[in-house]
Image (cartoon, rainbow, N blue to C red):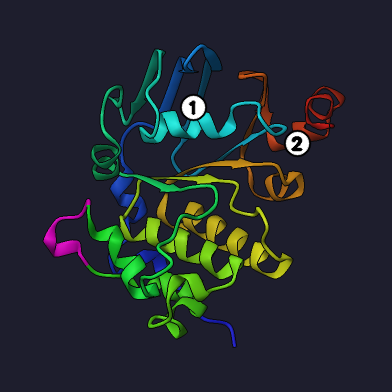
Amino acid sequence: MRHRVSPPFQRGLNSPASFEGARTMLTIDNVNLHYGAAQALRGVSLSADMGKITCVLGRNGVGKSSLLRAVTGQHPTSGGSITFQGETLDGLAPYRRAKLGVGYVPQGREIFPLLTVKENLETGFAPLPARDRNIPDDIFSLFPVLQSMLSRRGGDLSGGQQQQLAIGRAMVTRPKILVLDEPTEGIQPSIIKDIGRAIRYLRDSTGMAILLVEQYLDFCRELADQVYIMDRGEIVHEGPAETLDTPEARRHLTV
């Protein structure tokens, strides 16, 4: 039985009307990032637009996760600027960015294994005012398995179910941009399809911007509106998703 998703997140998540204004939600301008003496990002610039899926690809160790840590405030930048809806994020703590509307699904999911599914979802209440502290029904429409497992501990879920929980937790925060770090990693194909369907729905129905880091080329090819490829901490290719099949793009993605 297929669960119907009600239009567009009427029970609490942002609708397209919430995103009137500038088309560009996130602008990363000439950003550098260091871990001690090692430089992970070198003058990275990109943008993510509302109602669009922006995908960042690249081999292991090229700086993709570091880019998302810079966006979400998990690690300080050492140069350049990051703006969200025209407001600078530079120096803001992660919780302040979450309050502004930056939702984060980290690599490895990072759910709380001893908390129940319901309690994990409720951790998304932290950046919300009291009136919005509820779990939108549409999360269960997108991921019905979560509703059937509300009382189970997060650590008892499969990897795919934990990934759905991590996305649902981010959605509870009512993000204006959803930032996902390799959501298909270690996930079975059937769950990958569910995750792709959910990401596509969020783009099309809510107008939120989606910034997606991935290594799974076919997943990005099917979903992305705009793609960037990273190599050695730099952006080496950008363009629409169709450009992933060009020799230049493939050169930077092959091992």
Amino acid bearing label 2: Glu
Residue type marked 1? Ser
Q: Is residue 195 left or right of residue 148?
A: right
Residue position for label 2: 242
118 horizontally vs 65: left or right: left
Q: Measuring 38% from the left and 36% from the top, which residue is drawn there?
A: 72
**Could you tell me how many numbered marks the image carries?**
2
Indicate the secondary structure of the residue bearing disc 1: strand
What's the mark number on residue 82? none
Using the numbered discs, state the Cα–Cα distance from disc 2 to disc 1 in whole angstroms. Answer: 18 Å
- Locate the C terminus by quadrant: top right
Between 62 and 43, the one lying in front of the other is: 62
In the image, is residue 191 part of the stretch drawn in magenta?
A: no
Q: Which residues are magenta?
A: 127-133
Q: Quadrant of residue 123?
A: bottom left
Location of mark 1 (residue): 47
Position of residue 6 relative to residue 125, above or below, is below
